[in-house]
Amino acid sequence: MYLCKIGHPFILYFFIGRSSVESQLTTRQVASALQVSESSVKRWCDAGVIPTVRTVGGHRRIPLDGLLEFLETTNRQLVRPEEIGLTIAASRMGIDTRLPEVNTEDVSEATHLLRAKFEEAVVAGDEKACRRVLSQWFAIEQKFSKLADELIAHTFHRLGEMWSCQTLEVYEERRGCEICTQLLYELRRLIPEPAPNAPLAVGGSPEGDHYSLPSQMVEIVLRECGWRPSNLGINLPLKTLATAIRRSAPKMFWLSVSHIEDTEFFLRSYREFCDLIPKETVIVLGGRALDDRIRPHLKYTAHCDNLQQLARFATAMHGGDYNLKASTN
């Protein structure tokens, strides 16, 4: 076995049981691994996009290192790495040596240590350390919904407490958000591309809500559950979200509400929003701003207190069973 690390920090490919001659891949093998047409691969080879060598008979051969370089520079990923003898795993990058060695069999101890390290790294604005912790956690848990709830959301809840106690500056919290946003874009590449016929979900955050991390995490969770999610963004008037629903006819719409500037305006806008969308639209709500004072005034299909609840609901709905009475209104 030899190990190939792409420049992307979260992905390791393990190439098993092939000689250096056998690691010269055919265009058919690469096309199957990428799930594209062989003619596309040949065109990329001839254009120099994929490093290529020629056999004595004139056939194209693609060195493994050349393929990995292509993946890195074009931001692509292998859909079926096993087609070229690769297996893929999240990188189990070690945490900082100042922490005790993490035993991945003792998940509770490991996650406790990683949570403390992640909080420290986010406050310090240390992107490299944040990346190490995220990759270690993902290697242990292998579920993004758990990472989102128990590491990222937990950490930012703690940061909110620190800010309220005036032990954290606003810029430190915002800097941490920016770091996590970047790392989530990287981590998203670990989740396989949804099938073209996967159910569509669209969503975002309402006007006055400028928090991007929640909807970004919702998008990745839904992708992990086999959906085709489209994150429309933050600070969006509900009327434009209603237009998006009418035009795209998604199977699910999510609304993440972390902040409400004017409660009466939000409730009035939401009522108008419900009147504008098809009655059969499945609406999933979430976010810390939707407390017990506001939620009873809203119409929705399901309310999720966390992303693991969302994952269960999305999985059940994908399978056609989404009559979850405890979460509906």
Image: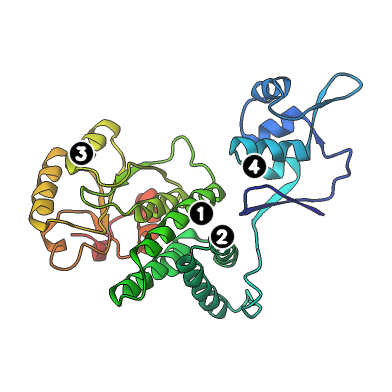
Q: Find disc 3 in the rendering and name its residue.
A: 242
Q: In 3D space, how far apart are the residues under numbered discs 2 and 1 (Cα atoms)?
A: 7 Å
Please state if 298 lies on the left or on the right of 108 as rendered. left
Q: In 3D space, how far apart are the residues under numbered discs 2 and 4 (Cα atoms)?
A: 25 Å
Q: Secondary structure at mark 1?
A: helix
Numbered mark located on residue 80 in the image: 4
For marks 3 and 4, give the one nearer the viewer.
Answer: 3
Measuring from the top left, give residue 59's x and y in whole percent.
83, 22
Q: Find disc 1 in the rendering and name its residue.
A: 183
Amino acid type of the residue that numbered disc 2 sits on in the rendered structure: Arg
Q: Is residue 25 above or below residue 152?
A: above
Q: Residues within 10 Å of mark 3 (few under 14, many from 20)?
A: some
Q: Secondary structure at mark 3?
A: helix
Q: Secondary structure at mark 4?
A: loop
Measuring from the top left, give residue 187's x and y in whole percent.
53, 52
Residue 167: quadrant of the picture: bottom left
Picture residue at 39% right of the left edge, 49% below the top: 318
Q: In 3D space, how far apart are the residues under numbered discs 3 and 4 (Cα atoms)?
A: 37 Å
